[in-house]
């Protein structure tokens, strides 16, 4: 069997046809598609794209998790096209740039972001079609139904080959420009295959991570489909805890930030509440396994969840590796480690930096040859993380090579990217962005020539306004929530580069 | 409403409802993360039978810094 997402899906569609594949809430009602029903929808999108002339085309997806989003995604990657899932929370100008840079020829648009249809049409000349994922047609767009209708009389679209490009995922760039990670059909398939664990079909997943992330797409959706799971959609991050009671999942993928919040809910229930009541009220009653990754998790939470019969298994990955590199497993785990490398993954170290070689390692960064050459050397992917392997083969992380701020929601923030934008403001002479307590701080040395006669309060307001203007355009996790005004320039090395390890030195008190 | 609201917030921090004052900030004074705040909003929906729209209300929601800001926002919403 070829290692493509088409063959993965077709096998599951056949094997599990009467089982539920996707569940979601419409108001208070739980709706579902079986594997067979969902397969017909996926095939409709695949054939529709082919009928409308999209073959080996990049197709962007813009929206939050919904059955239509996932259907469009599967329709793209089970054919010969390439999906470009985008973070809908980014500022419109950034989204337009990513659509242009990815050379997308079509865009699937969530009606929540319908206002983007006009600027995409105007500023992205390469985009030939925009399809609304649901709701009514917006001027200059078509609906998902009309796309499916257009492929109704088309024979099956050409199927992908292992080396075809299945997806481009944009990730934070340490050089200030986000990078498009190119993943092939085989990259994705072999990652899904390697992380499989034995469960009965019909197992319930609740998908709560942002759907444009590789971790969510591969571990929740593709893995779920391969195992015959029913994947339930969390309609909003506001409702995660409520939806755990609604869908009663067996398995969930979470970032550490979510685990920390759930722990607070457990504490709020009171020390006298019996564990079985908490397991029911907080975890939905059936949850057995939580896979986590993307940021460091304190072992304390693993021990606490265990009291309620929930096993938390930490793993490690990055989009460049499709994305999972290592994971603890139900019967083979070590707390504090990020698990053993997946089957087929080779690990090596270069001055402490973790290097990875496997069939899931990306082809490279889209149109970024220099960055690709810096990251992929002699077939080894340089992760930028420092770590070691213990005598039992478990991997541990103990630092980072590059300046990337990892928040506990799993989002990676490139400080240089934000600094570059804010430094354009004339009243800022030097700026360093740091991450503390899961929030970003801007440390600024103002431009003396422009600010030396300003009273302290006026200077503070002027700089705060710069941050406010920036924040207004950004998703919450990229907002700068603290401002520190320095009285002296940052400490620099002989090449006049700011020493990031010394940014807290010589800082004003209070 | 204010009293019940503070009881809900108390579930996310180490202070009791009586100790929570309107000028306290969620992040620095109460130690709530961005995801705690999201989940708290979900609790408020259930408690006060309202529905927030992360898209349409995002601007107002992102401006909430203190307990007082949240109470004002909630009162506007309920009324």
Image (spheres, rainbow, N blue to C red):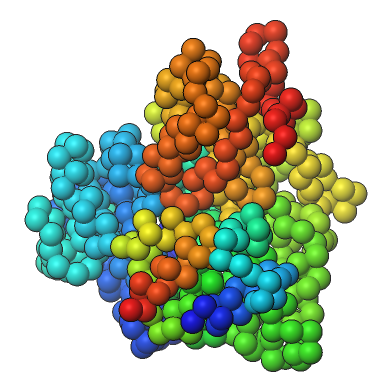
Q: Is residue A365 left or right of A320 when viewed as pictured?
A: left
A281 relative to B21, above or below: below
In the image, farthest residue toward the right: A391
Residue A120, visible in the rendered structure:
yes
The answer to whether residue A222 of the structure is visible from this angle is no
Image position, residue A283 (x, y; %): 63, 81
In terms of depth relative to the viewer, which is nearer, A284 or B33?
A: B33
What percent of the width, then of the height, locates residue A357? 65, 39
Q: Image quadrant of residue A198?
A: bottom right
Which residue is pictured at 67% across the width and 45% down the height?
A436
Toward the top, the furthest residue is: A494
Screen quadrant of the C terminus of chain A: top right
- Residue A408 rendering spot, x and y as whole percentages: 63, 54
Q: Residue at x 79, y 54 (%)?
A: A337
Residue drawn at the location 57% of the way across and 61% of the way down: B23
Q: Picture quarter containing residue A7? A: bottom left
């Amino acid at each position: 069997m070829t290692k493509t997402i088409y063959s993965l899906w077709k096998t599951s569609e056949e094997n599990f046809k009467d089982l539920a594949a996707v569940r979601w809430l419409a108001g208070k009602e739980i709706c579902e598609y079986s594997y067979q029903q969902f397969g017909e929808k996926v095939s409709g999108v695949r054939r529709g794209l082919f009928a409308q002339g999209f073959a080996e085309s990049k197709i962007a997806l813009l929206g939050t998790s919904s059955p239509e989003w996932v259907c469009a995604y599967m329709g793209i990657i089970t054919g010969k096209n390439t999906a470009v899932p985008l973070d809908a929370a980014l500022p419109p100008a950034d989204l337009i740039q990513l659509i242009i840079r990815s050379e997308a020829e079509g865009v699937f648009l969530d009606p929540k972001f319908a206002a983007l249809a006009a600027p995409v049409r105007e500023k992205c000349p390469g985009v030939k079609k925009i399809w609304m994922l649901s709701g009514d047609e917006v001027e200059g767009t078509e609906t998902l139904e009309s796309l499916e209708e257009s492929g109704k009389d088309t024979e099956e679209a050409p199927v992908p080959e292992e080396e075809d490009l299945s997806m481009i995922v944009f990730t934070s760039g340490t050089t200030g420009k986000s990078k498009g990670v190119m993943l092939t059909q085989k990259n994705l398939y072999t990652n899904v295959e390697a992380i499989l664990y034995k469960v009965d079909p019909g197992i319930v997943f609740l998908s709560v991570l942002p759907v444009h992330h590789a971790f969510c797409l591969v571990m929740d959706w593709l893995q779920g489909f391969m195992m015959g799971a029913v994947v339930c959609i969390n309609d909003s991050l506001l409702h995660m805890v409520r939806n755990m009671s609604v869908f009663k999942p067996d398995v969930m993928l979470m970032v550490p930030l979510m685990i920390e919040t759930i722990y607070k809910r457990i504490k709020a229930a009171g020390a006298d509440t019996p564990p079985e009541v908490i397991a029911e009220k907080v975890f939905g009653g059936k949850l057995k396994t939580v896979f986590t990754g993307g940021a460091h998790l304190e072992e304390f939470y693993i021990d606490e969840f265990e009291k309620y019969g929930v096993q938390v298994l930490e793993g490690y990955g990055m989009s460049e590796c499709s994305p999972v590199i290592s994971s603890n497993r139900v019967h083979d785990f070590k707390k504090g480690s990020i698990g053993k490398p997946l089957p087929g993954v080779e690990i090596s170290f270069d001055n402490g930096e973790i290097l990875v070689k496997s069939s899931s390692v990306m082809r490279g960064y889209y149109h970024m040859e220099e960055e690709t050459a810096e990251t992929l050397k002699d077939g080894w992917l340089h992760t930028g993380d420092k770590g070691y392997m213990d005598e039992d083969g478990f991997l541990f992380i103990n630092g980072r090579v590059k300046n990337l701020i990892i928040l506990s929601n799993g989002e990676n923030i490139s400080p240089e990217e934000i600094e570059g934008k804010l430094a354009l403001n004339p009243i800022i002479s030097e700026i360093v962005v740091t991450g503390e307590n899961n929030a970003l701080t801007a440390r600024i040395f103002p431009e003396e020539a422009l600010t030396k006669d300003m009273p302290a309060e006026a200077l503070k307001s002027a700089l705060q306004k710069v941050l406010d203007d920036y924040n207004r355009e950004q998703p919450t996790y990229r907002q700068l929530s603290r401002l520190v005004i320095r009285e002296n320039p940052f400490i620099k090395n002989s090449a006049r580069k700011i020493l990031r390890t010394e940014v807290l030195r010589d800082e004003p008190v209070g | 409403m204010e009293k019940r609201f503070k009881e809900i917030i108390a579930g996310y921090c180490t202070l009791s409802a009586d100790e929570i004052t309107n000028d306290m900030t969620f992040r620095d004074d109460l130690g709530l993360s961005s995801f705690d705040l999201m989940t708290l909003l979900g609790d408020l929906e259930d408690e006060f039978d309202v529905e927030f729209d992360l898209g349409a209300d995002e601007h107002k929601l992102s401006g909430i810094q203190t307990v007082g800001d949240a109470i004002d926002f909630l009162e506007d919403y309920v009324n």
